[in-house]
Image: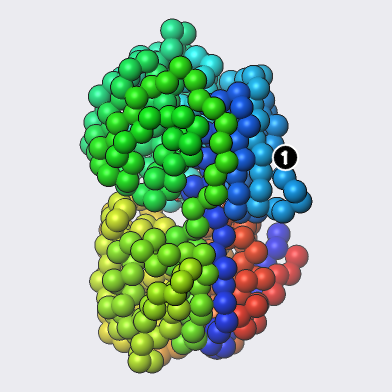
């Protein structure tokens, strides 16, 4: 298994270009199942999760080809559905595979998708996906760990109310509703930018969608959808991660291809912590405002609140801030696995239920640590960049799921980072 060796202490400086968003690319690839015409996506990031999703739709009947050699352009074409199944061996590795459920039901009238099972950060049920599809007339059975869904006479538009926002359920139901008979209203929908990006693609395919990005989305079903070309939304989590890499190392980075407002509430929290963010024509410049970082309390919330996917990175930043920071995770049940690893590097953190109290220290010390999930892994990278001495991070396949060319991008701005097999 690959490891990362990082020698900390160098303030980063230079330019980082943000890639297309993983959490936009995955539903966009699933959306290509909704039509028998070609879909062309630009800015597709080279990530393990994207490769998994492409492999899944290829098994279903999609031809996926890189266009014109440029790695980021992918042409997806599904003339007919050859299979209607997402098998366990694929879904257990990447739960976003459940996003083929809505499109398969809508276009093919049936789907057999493995229940994702839990993952490191929590049980992550899909009850909201299934209840919504039932409201639209699907018959859902759970058989041998699989969801067996049928809608032989097609789906029917319905009023669906979520008790809490769910990104995946909103995406699955929005895609299913595009080919349903009649109008669907999703009340209590998630408002993440990736949902707006998916609605953009669907509308360019001919779908009628209003309200994406708000908590009420109305979709008028169509008989069919056509082909389209779409450029993928930049990755706000990657942008936030590199902003914190600049701040934690006391350096200054120019982040390209990521508008500042994509950071949502993280922008204000970073400013409160003493980070300066200056808008540029296609991104922003970021560094410490006056050399010192201040402890700031944060609570993760659905967008536009502070993103749970930036919680671990912000915690790393707070370990070397002045004073204390209370970090509360409200979205997932078990998203503090970076805590014991950060403590091995000298961080002072105590966890009580869903809250972690971080007390800033002068310097972290390099140590061998273990990556456990995607965002926890990158928080260890941030800590290692600021720590004294050398850190070895094991199990970095987690990182490859969500950060395109991480060590190349960091190396290009001065980080002493090396991947060793
Ligand atoms: C998406 O996951 C993202 N993944 C996650 O990013 C992100 O952390 C999450 O949204 C934020 O909400 C992708 O977009 C591929 P949810 P998703 O449905 O859709 C509960 C990363 O690191 N819930 O919004 O799975 C669920 O357990 C990943 O890139 C139900 O109870 O998240 C969680 O507590 C991690 N029933 C909460 O809702 C359901 O049917 C939010 O989950 C669905 C979800």
Residue 312: where, in percent of width, then height?
42, 65
Task: Locate ligand 1 by image quadrant.
Answer: top left
The relative height of residue 258 versus residue 287 in the rendered view (above or below) is: above
Please state which of residues 201 and 372 is positioned toward the viewer in this rendering.
201
Residue depicted at x 38% and y 71%: 315
Q: Residue at x 34, y 67 (%)?
A: 266
Pick the front one: 336 or 68: 68
Residue 12 place in picture, x, y as percent? 55, 83
Neighbor class of circle 1 (other Cα within 10 Å; few <14, some 14-19, many 20+) is some
Report the quarter where the C terminus lies. bottom right
Of the pair 271 and 126, the residue shown nearer to us: 271
Residue 78 position, x and y percent, is: 64, 26
Q: In the picture provided, is 321 more to the left or to the right than 103?
A: left
Q: Residue at x 43, y 12 (%)?
A: 154
**Res. 420 visible in picture:** yes
Point out the residue furthest to the top here: 153
* Quadrant in the picture for residue 349: bottom left
Query: Going by the image, does 203 lie left or right of 213?
Result: right
Please tell me which residue is depicted at 40% across the width and 44% down the height of the picture. 195
Secondary structure beneath label 1 = strand
Way the structure is coloured: rainbow
In this view of the protein, can residue 310 be seen by the observer? no
Q: Which residue is mark 1?
A: 65
Q: Is residue 308 left or right of residue 299?
A: right
Q: In the visual, does 313 lie left or right of 365?
A: left
Tell me: residue 388, above or below residue 300: below
């Amino acid at each position: 298994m690959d490891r990362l060796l990082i020698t900390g202490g160098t303030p980063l400086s230079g330019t980082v270009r943000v890639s297309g968003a993983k959490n936009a690319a995955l539903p966009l690839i699933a959306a290509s199942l909704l039509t028998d015409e070609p879909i062309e996506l630009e800015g597709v990031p080279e990530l393990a999760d994207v490769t998994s999703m492409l492999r899944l739709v290829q098994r279903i009947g999609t031809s996926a080809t890189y266009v014109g050699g440029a790695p980021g352009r992918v042409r997806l074409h599904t003339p007919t559905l050859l299979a209607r199944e997402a098998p366990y061996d694929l879904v257990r590795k990447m739960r976003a595979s459940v996003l083929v459920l809505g499109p398969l039901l809508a276009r093919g009238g049936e789907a057999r998708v493995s229940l994702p099972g839990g993952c490191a950060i929590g049980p992550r049920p899909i009850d909201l996906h299934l209840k919504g599809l039932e409201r639209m007339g699907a018959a859902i059975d759970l058989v041998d760990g699989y969801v067996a869904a049928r809608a032989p006479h097609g789906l029917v538009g319905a009023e669906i109310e979520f008790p809490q926002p769910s990104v995946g359920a909103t995406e699955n139901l929005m895609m299913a509703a595009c080919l349903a008979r009649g109008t669907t209203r999703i009340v209590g929908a998630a408002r993440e930018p990736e949902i707006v990006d998916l609605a953009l693609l669907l509308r360019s395919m001919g779908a009628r969608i209003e309200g994406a990005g708000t908590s009420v989305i109305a979709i008028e079903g169509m008989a069919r959808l056509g082909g389209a070309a779409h450029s993928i939304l930049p990755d706000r989590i990657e942008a936030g991660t590199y902003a914190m890499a600049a701040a934690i190392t006391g350096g200054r980075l120019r982040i390209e291809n990521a508008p500042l407002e994509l950071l949502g509430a993280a922008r204000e929290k970073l400013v409160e912590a003493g980070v300066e963010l200056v808008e540029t024509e296609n991104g922003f410049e970021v560094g410490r405002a006056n050399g010192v970082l201040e402890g700031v309390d944060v609570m993760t919330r659905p967008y536009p609140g502070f993103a749970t996917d930036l919680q671990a990175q912000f915690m790393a930043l707070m370990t070397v801030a002045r004073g204390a920071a209370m970090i509360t995770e409200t979205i997932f049940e078990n998203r503090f696995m970076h805590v014991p690893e950060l403590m091995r590097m000298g961080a002072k953190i105590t966890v009580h239920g869903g809250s972690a109290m971080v007390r800033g220290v002068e310097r972290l010390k390099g140590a061998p640590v273990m990556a456990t999930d995607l965002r926890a892994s990158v928080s260890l990278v941030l800590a290692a960049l600021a720590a004294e001495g050398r850190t070895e991070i094991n199990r970095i396949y987690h990182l490859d799921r969500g950060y395109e060319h991480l060590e190349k991008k960091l190396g290009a701005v001065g980080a002493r980072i090396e991947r060793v097999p």
